[in-house]
Image (tube, helix red, strand yellow):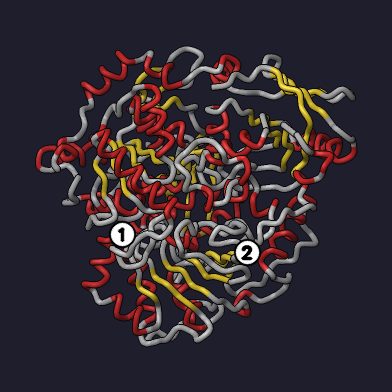
């Protein structure tokens, strides 16, 4: 009988171009996503070496990180940002790369548009100069973030020399309760295994709670894999996956579609395949989470308190003390008593249509607290159009939320959307690092529903008790 | 790429765990399209106040650590964003290596592309080095990639492991794009069997 293989091993083996003795294996890359921030030095490297882009068709670019979310057409006042955007435009033209530019109806966060255009498909190898490339693993693809030197490497060779990662299975039993989302699952996992709990590993998320997630939910979960240190996160493709991909613009058509689906059905890990590490999580026990510190592993249930630091080991205790000092919090404070100044609903973690629907359902008929400034930043122009067709923008605007253009926005604050020093923000993004959303800004990571509820209440509140209007 | 063989230099201790790449090089400096000149911005928010004044308490501003070329830091160094700018900034500031008990994968990968060494030692060994760098004036270490060894003049000696191929590239300063292109025939054969999907060809 053939050796039992994991989803990861099947994809990895199918993409090995060469395994030179004493060297890292050379892996073929099916899809290379490019954005303005991590690519200019790579294109310059190609020029300096007189190299071309080997597979322009397999390379797709957009602008997302540093662009303003003001109405399109407003001039970009940050001249350095404008130069970076124009560098990408020139490079795409010079090397023949498809670009979804500022004015494109398909522009959006690279990890939102890949899936919605059908570029992201099961069984693929996908890379991008961005750590949240792990998002695409939701489709049963092997997708991981790379640095700029590797961006240049893929542009030049369509391959990467990679050391073989280890495998980890995270088996989520039971079902998530009402009000507990994929974001809470991700935060719960990171809280349990730590921000370096999966370093060197590719995670496969499995179990009934993962199977029950929509594609949007799976993308949120895989997106946060990097916050546990993982090389990538994946979910085996199933009927949910296939239904999502079908009919998308760049999805296979006709006979190619039938062939692709047959292949995708062969991808899930074989029964009895072994992983280097297995973690079990009881999904039914999870609740809505709020981070209290300066990394995504510093997390507490919304019904809980900011933890005591006394009992922790030396290095963890000092890290927790520094985090609390930065966050302006004391141990023992009830999470629901933490008041907020800002709310950000957006980012490659939680800016898809389902996220906006969930947040709008909470916001409907309510009004944002007087002391809070709240913004909703759709992940793409397509998400924005869909939301507007459904009237979600009206719900948000009537409730006092700002409704903006698509981009990475305040997830990393490379554009003008930033926190002021000391401002406290409920954010649906992925990182609560010091200064991530603006110098001195204090970020608490939550789900879209929890963020919307916090905007209205003015403090964190348990979404499971929400009075929907 | 600049080869890395043996390096001896002054050690600076950064006694924090989970130092993320947002701290190493904050986002406002990522808009530049060059590969150089990032050193002035390394650890910017820790080194400088909001008004741009130097924070004299930050370890790299202590005169005794001036000119340090080896950084010792807590576990999970370089976590978070994939920005290679973090390695460029450390290298441009004058560092040749970071020693920690663990590194985030992408940071470690990016290091190897820049002749910069991410040296993994045990937590206990890192704690010893941290202590020595704090206690001893002008504390110097030798990082020897040929022997895969870190040592000082006071009896500290520890072996580290590094992937043999990566070590070979670092020792010789090899361009790994060139190495991959040695497999042109295999890549071309793979592409013949796996052409770009027809859906990508439509405009």
What secondary structure is marked by label 2? loop
How far from the left and from the top, in percent, is residue A62? 31, 48
Horizontal side of residue A100 vs B163, given as left or right: left
Q: Is there any visible trace of residue B83 in the rendered image?
A: yes
Choose the circle earlier in sequence order: 2 or 1: 1
Question: Residue placed at 51% from the left, 74% from the top?
Answer: A342
Q: Is residue B148 above or below residue A194?
A: above
| Quarter of the figure with residue A409 | bottom left
Horizontal side of residue A406 vs A431, given as left or right: left
What chain does badge 2 belong to?
A
Quadrant placement of the C terminus of chain B? top left
Q: Is there any visible trace of residue B104 in the rendered image?
A: no
Question: Residue placed at 38% from the left, 83% from the top?
Answer: A399
Q: Residues within 10 Å of mark 1 (few under 14, many from 20)?
A: many
Q: Is residue A235 above or below residue B129?
A: below
| Quarter of the figure with residue A3 | top left
A315 or B42: nearer the eye? Answer: B42
Q: Which mark is residue A440?
A: 2
Between marks 2 and 1 in the image, the one whose residue lies nearer the viewer: 2
A7 or B197: nearer the eye? Answer: B197
B63 or A158: nearer the eye? Answer: B63
Task: Identify the residue under disc 1.
Answer: A380
Question: Residue placed at 61% from the left, 68% from the top?
Answer: A421
Q: CA distance from mark 2 to mark 1?
A: 28 Å
Marks 2, 1 in one chain: yes
């Amino acid at each position: 009988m053939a050796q039992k293989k994991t989803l990861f091993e099947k994809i990895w083996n199918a993409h090995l171009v060469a395994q030179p003795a004493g060297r890292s294996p050379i892996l073929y890359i099916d899809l290379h996503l490019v954005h303005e921030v991590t690519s200019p030095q790579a294109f310059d490297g190609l020029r300096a070496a007189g190299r071309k882009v080997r597979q322009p068709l397999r390379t797709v670019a957009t602008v997302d990180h540093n662009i303003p979310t003001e109405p399109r057409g407003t001039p970009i006042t940050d001249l350095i940002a404008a130069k970076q955007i124009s560098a990408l435009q020139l490079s795409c033209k010079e090397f023949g790369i498809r670009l979804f530019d500022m004015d494109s109806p398909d522009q959006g966060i690279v990890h939102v548009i890949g899936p919605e255009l059908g570029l992201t498909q099961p069984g693929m190898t996908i890379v991008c100069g961005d750590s949240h490339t792990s998002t695409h693993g939701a489709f049963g693809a092997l997708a991981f973030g790379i640095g700029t030197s590797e961006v240049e490497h893929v542009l030049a060779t369509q391959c990467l020399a990679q050391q073989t990662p280890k495998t980890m299975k995270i088996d989520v039993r039971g079902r998530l309760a009402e009000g507990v989302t994929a974001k809470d699952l991700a935060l719960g996992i990171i809280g349990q295994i730590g921000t370096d709990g999966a370093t060197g590993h590719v995670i496969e998320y499995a179990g009934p709670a993962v199977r029950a997630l929509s594609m949007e939910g799976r993308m949120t979960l895989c997106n946060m894999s990097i916050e546990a240190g993982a090389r990538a996160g994946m979910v085996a493709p199933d009927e949910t996956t296939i239904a999502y991909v079908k009919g998308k613009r760049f999805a296979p058509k006709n006979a190619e579609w039938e062939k692709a689906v047959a292949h995708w059905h062969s991808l899930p890990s074989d029964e009895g395949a072994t992983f280097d590490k297995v973690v079990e999580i009881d999904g039914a026990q999870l609740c809505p989470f709020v981070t209290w510190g300066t990394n995504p592993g510093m997390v507490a249930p919304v019904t809980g308190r900011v933890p005591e630091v006394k009992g922790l080991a030396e290095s963890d205790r000092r890290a927790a003390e520094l985090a609390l000092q930065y966050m302006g919090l004391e141990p023992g404070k009830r999470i629901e008593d933490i008041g907020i100044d800002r709310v950000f609903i957006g980012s490659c973690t939680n800016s898809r249509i389902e996220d906006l629907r969930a947040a709008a359902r909470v916001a409907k008929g309510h009004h944002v607290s007087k002391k809070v400034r709240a913004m909703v930043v759709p992940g793409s122009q397509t998400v924005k159009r869909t939301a507007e067709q459904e009237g979600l923008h009206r719900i948000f605007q009537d409730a006092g939320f700002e409704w903006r253009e698509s981009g990475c926005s305040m997830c990393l604050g490379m554009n003008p959307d930033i926190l002021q020093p000391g401002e406290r923000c409920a954010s649906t993004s992925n990182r609560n690092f010091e200064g991530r959303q603006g110098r001195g800004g204090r970020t608490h990571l939550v789900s879209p529903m929890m963020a919307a509820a916090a905007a209205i209440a003015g403090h964190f509140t348990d979404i499971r008790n929400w009075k929907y209007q | 790429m600049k080869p890395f063989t043996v390096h001896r230099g002054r050690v600076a201790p950064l006694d924090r765990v989970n130092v993320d790449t947002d701290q190493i090089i904050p986002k406002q400096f990522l808009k530049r399209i060059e590969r150089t000149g990032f050193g002035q911005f390394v650890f910017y928010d820790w080194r400088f106040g909001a008004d741009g004044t130097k924070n004299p308490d930050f370890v790299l501003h202590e005169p005794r650590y001036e000119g340090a070329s080896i950084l010792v830091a807590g576990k999970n160094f370089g976590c978070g964003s994939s920005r290679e700018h973090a390695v460029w900034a450390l290298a441009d500031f004058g560092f040749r290596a970071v020693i920690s008990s663990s590194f985030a994968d992408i940071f470690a990968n990016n290091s190897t592309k820049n002749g910069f060494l991410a040296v993994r030692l045990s937590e206990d060994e890192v704690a010893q080095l941290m202590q020595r760098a704090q206690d001893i004036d002008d504390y110097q270490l030798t990082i020897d990639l040929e022997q895969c060894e870190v040592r000082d003049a006071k009896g500290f000696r520890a072996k580290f492991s590094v992937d043999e191929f990566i070590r070979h590239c670092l020792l010789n300063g090899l361009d790994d794009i060139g190495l991959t292109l040695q497999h042109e025939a295999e890549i071309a054969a793979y592409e013949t069997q796996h052409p770009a999907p027809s859906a990508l060809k439509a405009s």
